[in-house]
Image: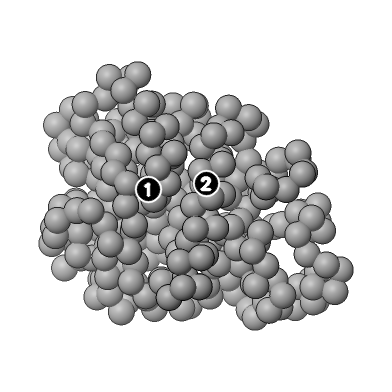
Amino acid sequence: MENNQNLKELVKQRYSELALNADEPKGCCCGRNPASPSKKVFTIMSEDYTNLKGYEPDADLGVGCGLPTQYADINKGDTVVDLGSGAGNDCFIARAEVGESGRVIGIDFSPKMILKARKNALKRGYTNVEFLEGDIEEMPLHDNTADVIVSNCVLNLLPQKNMIFKEIYRVLKPGGHFCISDVVLNGIFPKEFTDNAAMYAGCIASAIQREDYLKEIEKADFMDIRVERTKTVLIPDEVLYEHLDEDTIRKYKSGNVGIYSITVTGWKP
C-alpha cells in the first residue's frame, strides 16, 4: 500500500510540474521527466486534436495517447465524466458533443491541474463543465451518475488497476458505457525497465499486459468489450538513453516485446 502511494505521488508531482509548464512546447506522457536537466521534448504518442469540434489549444498538454471522444458515441444531453482530465482538453471536446443540455465532469488528482482546468473553463464561460479533485479509484461521484466515461492515457499510471474498472462500473448508469485510450504492453520487459521511476512517471513502465488489461474490464462485469483502435508506440533512443543504462536497453531491444496505445469500449448492462 505504501509503495502504491509513493508511485501515485511520483505521478502527481510529474503532472503538477506539467501544469506549471503548460505554456512550454508540448511533450507527452512518455516524454521527458520534468525534473531532469534535459530540455528535449518528445511527442511519442500525442494525437492531433485540431480538427475536433470544441478543441481548445491552451487546454491541450500533449499527453494523450488516443482520441477517446472520437469513439465514445456521446449524445446531446449526456453526462460525461473524464478521468484524469488535466487542463480540460477532452472535457471541452465532450462539451461540444453533449451541447448545452448536457454535463461534463473532469476528475484529476493534481490540485494544480484542477486549478488550470477551472481557469480554462471560466474564461470561456462554460457553465456545464466542472472539475473535481479526487482519485479515480474512489471517485467523488454518486452511483449511476454518468452516461459515458472517457479517459486518455491515465489509467495505466495508477498502481491499483484491479479497482479502476469496478469504480467506473459503479459510476456509470445502467446502459452506460466507457471509451478509454491507454497504454498496454505485450511480452516480458526487463525488471530494470519496469522498476525505473522516470519510465513509470512516463506511463510506459506502469502499463500492464494487454491481455491482463482486458481481463480487468471483464472482471468488472462489462459487456460488449471492443478494442476500437491499436497503435504501436515507439520510444526514441534519446529517451531510452536518458533514463536507462546500456545493459537494460540491450535487454529491452533484444526481447520480443511491444508497447501499444489501445482505445477500448465497454458497456454496463
**Which element is circle 2 on?**
helix
Residue 69 position in % (x across, y down): 37, 44
88 to the left or right of 253: left
Residue 29 position in % (x across, y down): 58, 50
Q: Residue at x 21, y 41 (%)?
A: 75
190 to the left or right of 114: right
Q: Residues within 10 Å of mark 2 (few under 14, many from 20)?
A: many
Q: Which mark is residue 33?
A: none
Tag 1: residue type? Asp
The image quadrant that residue 258 belongs to is bottom right
Pick the front one: 181 or 246: 246
Q: CA distance from mark 1 to mark 2?
A: 10 Å
Read off the residue under disc 1.
108
Q: Is residue 132 visible?
A: yes
The image quadrant that residue 121 belongs to is top left
Farthest front residue in view: 2
Residue 114 position in % (x across, y down): 37, 39
The answer to whether mark 1 and mark 2 are in CB contact below 8 A is: yes
Q: Which mark is residue 15?
A: 2
Q: Is residue 72 visible?
A: no
